[in-house]
């Protein structure tokens, strides 16, 4: 998400990784499947599988997503894990 001087935001589709050791950000946006551009999604780190899990968020149109994605920092690849069946309702700005 980027902000403009008037306070509006723009949904983004890029992936960045922070390195505390280097004190720097590295762009990790890869080719292939990835979540649609969005703001207000929630992410959690699964320390057992060493992957990040993303859920929901809001499109620039105001549509709230109900999808689940996993990002593997070892490969830099996103995998859609939405599947079918019961899942949380669509939402954004959640924790």
Image (tube, rainbow, N blue to C red):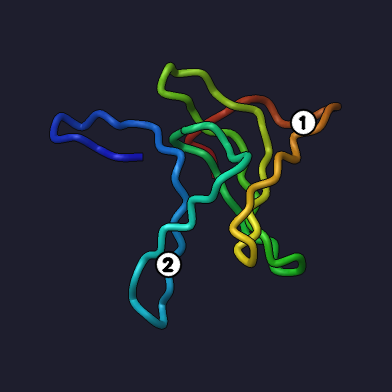
89 left or right of 41 in image: right
Closer to us: 52 or 89: 52
In which quadrant of the rendered view does residue 20 lie? bottom left
> In the rendered view, would you say 52 is above or below 14?
below
Query: Measured along the vertical axis of the image, is residue 41 above or below residue 86?
Result: below
Q: Nearer the viewer, residue 15 or 41?
A: 15
**Residue pushed farthest right?**
85
Seen at 30% across and 40% down, the residue is: 2
Q: Residue furthest front?
A: 31
Label 1 residue SS: loop
Q: Position of residue 4 (x, y in %)?
A: 19, 35
Image spot of residue 62 (x, y percent): 45, 18
Measuring from the top left, give residue 86's x and y in whole percent.
83, 28
Image quadrant holding the N terminus, namely: top left
In this view, 26 is above or below 43: below
Along the polypeptide, which appears first: circle 2 or circle 1?
A: 2
Name the quadrant containing residue 65: top right
Quadrant where the C terminus sits is: top right
Q: Residue at x 39, y 32 (%)?
A: 11
Which residue matches tag 1?
Answer: 87
In the rendered view, tell whether residue 37 sits above or below residue 31: above
Are there few (<14), some (14-19), or many (20+) residues within 10 Å of tag 1?
Answer: few
Tell me the crowding category of disc 2: few under 14, some 14 to 19, or many 20 or more residues within 10 angstroms, Cα based: few
Left or right, 9 with respect to 44, comes to left
Q: Secondary structure at mark 2?
A: strand
**Numbered circle sitting on residue 45:** none
Q: Total of numbered circles in the picture?
A: 2
Residue, disc 2: 18
Residue at 65% of width from left, 59% of height from top? 72
Q: Nearer the viewer, residue 19 or 89?
A: 19
Left or right: residue 62 versus residue 79 is left
């Amino acid at each position: 998400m980027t902000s403009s001087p008037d306070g509006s935001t723009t949904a983004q589709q890029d992936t960045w990784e922070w390195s505390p050791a280097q004190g720097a950000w590295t762009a990790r946006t890869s080719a292939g499947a990835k979540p649609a551009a969005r703001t207000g999604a929630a992410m959690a780190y699964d320390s057992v599988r060493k992957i990040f899990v993303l859920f929901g968020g809001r499109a620039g149109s105001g549509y709230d997503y109900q999808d689940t994605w996993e990002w593997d920092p070892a490969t830099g690849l996103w995998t859609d894990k939405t599947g079918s069946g019961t899942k949380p309702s669509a939402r954004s700005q959640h924790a």
